[in-house]
Amino acid sequence: MRIVSTIFAVHLLVPSAVVPPKAIQTNMQGPRVIIAGATRVRAIVTGDGSEVYSSSFDLQVVLRRFVDDMQRPVLSFDSFNFIQNAIESSQGSTGKLSLRLLQAGTSVVINPTPTGDDIQASLRLSGHYDLIDRIVGYAGTGLQDADDYDSPSEEFTGTLRGRLVLPRIPGRPGGSLDLHQGELSLVGNGVLGAVRKISFQLHAPTTDLAPSPCSDGTMPLRRTLAVQPVYVRADPTDSTADQESYFATELAKANDLWGRCCIQFEAGSPAYLDRPTLQVITADPDPAATSAEETDLFDEFVDDDAVEIFVIESFLPETAHGGGASWGGGKATARIITGVNNLPGYQRHLAHLLGHILSLCHPLTGCSPPRSDASAGTIMGLSNFANDHPDTQSASNCLSAANPLLRYRFATCCPTPDDPKVAAALRDCWDVGISQKRSEREDQPE
Ligand SMILES: [Zn+2]
C-alpha cells in the first residue's frame, strides 16, 4: 500500500503492537545466547523520491550477552537477518529487500537495570533487492570456474534503541526484545537507492540458551536455508525421475559438507517448469556474462523465501560453468542452475555452489564484504567439469557463511570442520549446562 500523506505515516509510527517489557527480575550473570524473531512487523519506508510507503518485514536476530573481565555486561549482535516486502519505487517494484550484518559481533551500548537492559546499537548492514538484479545484472567473480555471478549490494546503517529482558531462568519463556526506535538508513546513494530509510518499532519474544557460546565465537546453533528445486521438463508427461534422483544425491552431499558447520539445506516440494527450449541452456560465450536463456529461466520461477535450484539436462556447451553456476551469492535473491550430466563423477557440485550462495567466493579471489574468500583446499576450491571438489570443510568457511534467508535455532550441533586443531577447539562448545538441555531443546534427532 502506498501512503500519499506524510502525516498519515507519522500516525502509523505509533505502534499498537508494542507491549511494555515484563517487570521481572532478570538473572543476567551467566553468558547467554539469545534468538529474537518477529514477523509481519509494520515499517514506514522512504523511497527514492520523497515518497513514503507502508510495508512490513520479518526479522530474526541473534545476540550474545556475557560479562567481561571487569564484570561489565557486554551484548553483541551476531546476526540480523531482515526481509522486507517490496515497495513501488519510481524505478519499479523493488522486490523483497533483504539486509544482513556486514560484520558479526557488533557490540551494543548496554545499561543494565533490575528489570532488563536498556540497549543502543549501531549496525552496518548489507542490503539488496531484486530490482538491482534486474536493472544492473550480474558480474562474474569466480571466473576461473565461471560459476559465481555476483550482484552489487548497498550499505545501510542501523540505529536501534530499546530494551532486552531475559527470563530469570535460562531457557524459560518470558524474554523479549523491544525496539522503541529502529531506523535503517541507506549509506550514500547506493546502487539504485530505491529504498532510503526504514523506520519501525517492534516487540519480539526471545528464546535463550545458557551458558556459553563455543570457544571460537561460534554458537550451539543450527542454521537452515530453504532451497526450492525446480525441474525443467518438456511437458507434464516428461519424466523428471533422473533430475529428482540427481538433486537428492547432490543435496545429501551438500548437507554432509555444510552439516559440519551446523548448516542444513531444507528442500521445498518440487516445482516443475514446462519449457522444452530451456531443458538445455545455452551459455554466453563470454564467461563473465549471463546468457539470455539463463535470464529467461530466472524470470520463469521466483520463490522469495528460498534459493531456487533449477535442474536442467545440461548446458550448451556441456562444460559451460563447469556444469552449473550460482547467481547472487550471499543475497536472498540467490539462485542456481545445475545440469544432471554432472553425475556420476561430480557429486559435490551442488555443495560447492551452495557455498557461493552462503556468500563464499573461491579461495584467493580477493572478495570483500559482504562476500568472503573461502579456505583453500576445501569444498570451495576449484574443480573442472566432472572432477569433484575436495571433501573438506574449514572453520573459516563455517564462520563466514551468511545469507539473509538463513534461519537460526538452538540445536544439539557443534561444528566439526576437517581441520583437526580447530575441530577440537570447536567441540569445546558443549559443556555441562548445554548437555543437560539437549533433550528439551533438540529440534530433530542427530
Ligand atoms: Zn565455484
Image: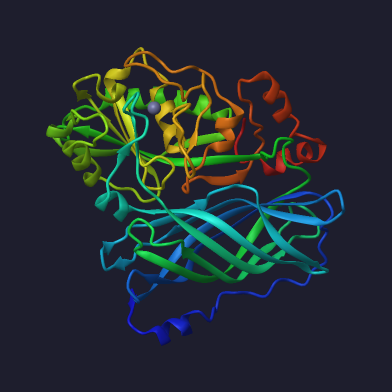
Q: Quadrant of ligand 1?
A: top left
Residue lying at the far right in this picture: please name it. Answer: 70
Q: Judge whether 45 appears above or below 258 on screen.
A: below
| Quadrant hosting residue 420 | top right
Compared with residue 102, is residue 239 higher up or lower down, i.e. above or below? above
Q: Which of the 4 image quarters holds residue 322?
A: top left
Residue farthest along the bottom direction in this orientation: 7
What x and y, as percent, mark residue 429?
Answer: 74, 34
Depicted 283 relative to depicted 8: above or below: above
Q: Residue drawn at (43%, 62%), measured in percent from left and top?
A: 188
Q: Is residue 219 above or below residue 243?
A: below
Query: Colour scheme used in the picture?
Result: rainbow
Q: Position of residue 346 (x, y in %)?
A: 37, 16
Classify residue 1 as left or right of residue 125. Answer: left
Looking at the figure, which quarter contains the N terminus? bottom left
Number of residue marks: 0
Spot occupied by residue 108 in the image (x, y as percentages of width and height): 68, 59
Corner quadrant of residue 150 = top left
Name which residue lies at 56% across and 41% down: 223
Between 369 and 273, the one nearer to me in the picture: 369
Q: Is residue 364 left or right of residue 32?
A: left
Q: How far across and how far down the image is residue 20, in percent?
A: 67, 75
The residue closer to the viewer here, 372 or 366, is 366
Name the residue located 68 percent from the left edge and 43 percent from the top edge.
Answer: 441
Q: Nearer the viewer, residue 101 or 345?
A: 101
State the residue lying farthest toward the left: 277
Image quarter hosting the C terminus: top right
